[in-house]
């Protein structure tokens, strides 16, 4: 309570309201009953400069899939080499669509991890 009168009651009320509000809960693919399934994917464009220099690599992203299956947020978690494929990978993933994840029969927002690899053909 930090010696502040009534703080325990305020903290308890705040905790209960947070737990009761499921609209803003974001789950992970490990915590949902049914993970999101992609229904529309767009391939990322291989950057011309990287192609001409023979550069290959990957981008790992954290993707927030909303209740309606749309992509709401994309964060680059790791990229090798850095700043070569990040932009095209992020742009492609933003246009993807999913069947939303479910928890206890209801659609939920889910954060998933996805890696896109950029490999030149032989």
Image (cartoon, rainbow, N blue to C red):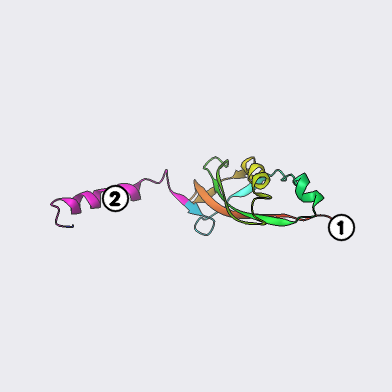
Where residue 84 sits in the image (x, y, percent)?
A: 68, 50
The local crowd at label 2, few if under 14, some if 14 to 19, many if 20 or more residues have their Cα within 10 Å, is: few
Q: Nearer the viewer, residue 41 or 120?
A: 120
Would residue 50 be counted in the magenta stretch? no
Magenta residues?
Answer: 3-26
Residue 99 spot, x, y in % from top left: 60, 45
Disc 1 secondary structure class: loop
Q: Is mark 2 on a helix, strand or loop?
A: helix
Q: Nearer the viewer, mark 2 or mark 1?
A: 1
The percent position of residue 89, horizontal first and vertical second, equals 66, 47
Mark 1, residue position: 122
Residue 59: x and y, percent? Answer: 65, 54
Q: Quadrant of the C terminus?
A: bottom right
Residue on which the image places disc 2: 16
Q: Residue at the spot x=14%, y=57% of the render?
A: 3
* Numbered marks: total: 2
Q: Quadrant of residue 68?
A: top right
Q: Tell whether 43 sits left or right of 70.
A: right
Residue under the point 74% across and 44% down = 45
What numbered label is drawn on residue 102?
none
Tell me the quarter of the image containing the N terminus: bottom left
Residue located 79% across and 50% down the image? 51
């Amino acid at each position: 309570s930090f010696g502040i009168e009534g703080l325990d009651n305020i903290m308890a009320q705040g905790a209960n309201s947070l737990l009761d509000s499921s609209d803003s809960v974001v789950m992970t693919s490990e915590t949902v009953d049914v993970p999101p399934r992609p229904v529309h994917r767009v391939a990322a464009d291989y950057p011309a400069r990287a192609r001409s220099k023979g550069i290959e690599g990957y981008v790992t992203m954290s993707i927030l899939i909303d209740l309606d299956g749309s992509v709401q947020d994309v964060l680059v978690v790791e990229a090798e080499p850095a700043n070569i494929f990040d932009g095209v990978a992020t742009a492609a993933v933003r246009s993807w669509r999913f069947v939303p994840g479910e928890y206890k029969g209801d659609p939920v927002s889910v954060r998933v991890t996805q890696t896109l690899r950029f490999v030149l053909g032989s």
